[in-house]
Amino acid sequence: MTESKERIIEQAEETVLHTYNRYPVVLDRGEGVYLYDTEGKKYLDFAAGIAVQALGYHYPGYDEALKEQMGRLLHTSNLYYNVPAMEAARKLVKASGMSKVFFTNSGTEAVEGAVKTARKYAYQKDGRNDHEIIAMQHSFHGRSMGALSVTGNEKYQAPFRPLIGGIRFAEFNNLKSVLSQVTDRTCAVILETIQGEGGIYPASEEFLKGVKALCEERDMLLILDEIQCGMGRSGHMFAWQEYGVKPNVMTCAKALGCGVPVGAFVLDEKAAKASLVPGDHGTTYGGNPFACAAVSKVFDIFEKDDIIGHVREVAGYLEEKLDGLAEKYDFIRGRRGKGLMQGLVIGGRSVGEIVLKSLDKGLLVITAGSGVLRLVPPLVIEREHVDEMLEKLCAALDA
């Protein structure tokens, strides 16, 4: 007999370190774009595990690929080659048009690798150890010390100082602000192509192209964080592809494995040829056969079933409905985002309370920053799911 929800939560609070204020629900299983809790209640999932479950739950062929790999080999370490890692790397290189891949266990680790790549690239040129990186205010790149150092949020940083040195912060979508932070020691600029945690802010084309030109002019590396906005979520495989601005280093994770923990940083030829060499970076689990079998299958499904084409088709409908919602409720100040990464700007109401009311109505949505309701559903949602979301969200807003 399954233990009660209350007892499960009580046990979790007794044994799991309280670093998350979790919602009072115990999720048990998923099917398609729906989740079910231990009491059998059904939820329409417009959170997707924070933009991870791009294919929803039990997408045809995905589970089978993982089961097959489990029957063959789970782990070898990076002291040896394995077929799934080579296949996954080949497909990621092809999809990005870049050169080399390093697989990690998470997005945070991908950012760590990107930062090390930039520092090593600059060190190779002049042998100095005082290089600087420009990051963006209100950005989010992860919780480890290196990733936290380039995260532009004082709330997250303050308890853990001193962080790694040589980080300067500029205003997102303000090229003059970036220029004001450049010194003769600047080796890279890092930014999210679409800021996620900071409030769903897409980069402007002028800004992104201006930063790219600056990096080329000064021989600095452009690092684009595509951990949340990548893998089709924006309506392009990677959000930067819409702008035609290829980075020197790209980080990705979340939907890369569609539920299996895996990340990667990807280098163009320039960065790959003049940065990390044997002994500079490593990981025990990164690139293991099981995780890479997931990555490989995800790319196969994206291509076979034209997932990106589907995102473009359904995203327009979602945007139309969200814009209508903003007209209906005066406390919804607007919408911003791209593809199936959307945010509703809330004023005069608690976003957290809206999330809880939505949960009660059988809808999973999440927050972004302090005043934005974030919608990042599985990329396989249909128009009928948008309509269902709208009905449940309106019920929550009216409650």
Image (spheres, grey):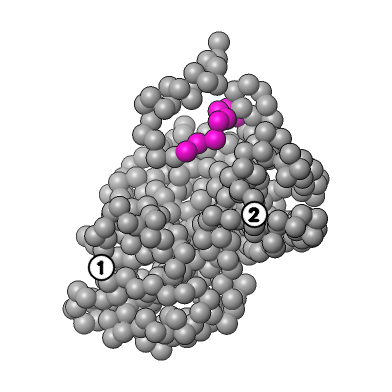
Q: Residue at x 31, y 84 (%)?
A: 183
Left or right, 224 with respect to 134, comes to right
Q: Which segment did they paint magenta? A: 21-29
The three-letter code of the residue at mark 2 reads: Gly
Where is residue 190 shown, x and y percent of the image? 42, 70
Image coordinates for residue 227, horizontal then vertical, percent: 49, 57
Q: Which residue is mark 1?
A: 165
Residue beneath disc 2? 348
Label 2 crowd bin: few (<14), some (14–19), many (20+), radius 10 Å: few
Left or right side of 209 for 168: left
The question of residue 349 being in magenta is answered with no
Seen from this angle, which residue lies furthest bottom?
217
Of residues 78 and 389, the one drawn nearer to the viewer in this rendering: 389
Q: Position of residue 321 (x, y in %)?
A: 79, 56
The image quadrant where one finds the C terminus is top right
Residue sitting at x 38%, y 60%: 154
- Residue 18, picture quadrant: top left
Tag shown at residue 335: none
| Residue 28 on the magenta segment | yes
Inspect this view and state whether residue 168 appears: yes
- Residue 276 pos. (x, y %): 29, 67
Asked which quadrant contains residue 155, the reply is bottom left
Residue that extends furthest to the front in the rendered view of this protein: 348
- What is the secondary structure assignment of the residue under circle 2? loop
341 is higher (above) or lower (below) than 96: above
Q: Residues within 10 Å of mark 1 (few under 14, many from 20)?
A: few
Q: Pick the residue in front: 367 or 49.
A: 367
Who's the residue at 34% across and 73% down the image? 168
> Which mark is nearer the camera, 1 or 2?
2
